[in-house]
Image: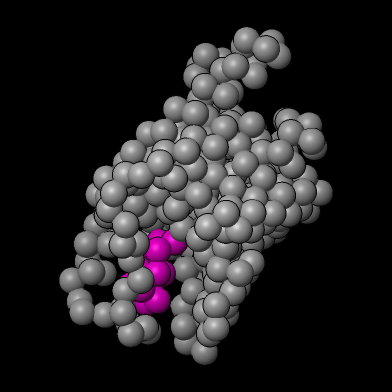
Amino acid sequence: MPRSLAAGLAGLIFGLGLAIAEMINPAKILAFLDIAGDWDPSLALVFLAAVGVAFFGYGWALTVEKPALADSFSLPEKTRIDVRLVVGAAIFGIGWGLGGLCPGPGLASIAYGNFDSLFFITAMGLGLYSAGEIG
Amino acid sequence: MRMENFTPISALLGGALIGLGATVLLALNGRIAGISGITAGIIRPARNDWAWRAMFVAGLIAGAAAYRFGGGPLQDLQFIPSTLAIVLAGFLVGFGARLGGGCTSGHGICGLARVSKRSMVATAIFSTAAVTTVYLLHHVWGGA
């Protein structure tokens, strides 16, 4: 199905980017977050480039009525800054600082065959599920 | 700052590809490349909404695998925290991302690209929380 293939292609490019940027290496992410230690600012450039490209890419993509392979764009609808956003972001940040991994890099790191990746992803899945349970 | 660990070229190139991947997913599928959201939809699948998510994740892993087996410079990952810490971290990341409506890709990349106020707030909060957590763990409680 073309929609699945397209998603696979997008994921491939995204995953390749994560690997090239070395963002799948928890040590590199922690080195960026460790501003008081041996600071590695690489992640800042990763975000800069990613947001920069996506900003223009999104602007271009949204000039048309609908995406190429779907009936409509599925964009987030919430605009209010609510308690869930703030608390959720804080909890996420603590987890990110604790482990040095977030969802994308955590999943992509599976390609390197470490058990820790599986542990992280499994726990992440539990966390995703649990938060969904509380609505 | 350890200059030998600073990798500006690969950071910019990798980042550009990440942005491109997000653009492709939006332009073709009309979807936001928020990994936590995509994954959440695999764990709790809605009808007819599962395949593209699984393919995206498969592509993500395949892309990293292509880099690894293609001889990219990064050949070994370094997991510094204990396994227990990693499990706790994973749970917090998943829980927080679901609650907060996104993660570093959903809010930090896609949200900022859309100039979303919610994403700007979320990114500022989780970045501060992450830096503070690392500071406390490495320099206050645990020692460098």
Whether residue A12 is visible to the viewer of this picture, yes or no, is: no
- Reply yes or no: does residue B30 show up in magenta: yes
Whether residue B122 is visible to the viewer of this picture, yes or no, is: yes
Extreme-left residue of the structure: A63
Query: Going 60% across and 58% down the picture, which residue do you hit?
Result: A133
In the image, residue B13 sits, relative to residue B57, either above or below, namely: above
A108 and B126: which is toward the camera: B126
Query: Going 50% across and 49% down the picture, which residue do you hit?
Result: B99
A79 and B128: which is toward the camera: A79
The magenta span reads B22-33
Q: Position of residue B123 (x, y in %)?
A: 39, 39
| Direction from residue A128 to residue B125 in the image, left or right | left
Extreme-front residue of the structure: A134
Query: Going 70% across and 14% down the picture, which residue do you hit?
Result: B142
| Direction from residue A62 to residue B60 in the image, left or right | right
In the image, residue B124 sits, relative to residue B63, either above or below, namely: above
In the image, residue A118 sits, relative to residue A72, either above or below, namely: above
Q: Position of residue B106 (x, y in %)?
A: 43, 53
Query: Going 35% across and 71% down the picture, which residue do you hit?
Result: A74
B4 and A41: which is toward the camera: A41
| Direction from residue A46 to residue A106 in the image, left or right | right
Q: Position of residue A50 (x, y in %)?
A: 38, 49
Task: Give the quadrant of residue B9.
Answer: top left
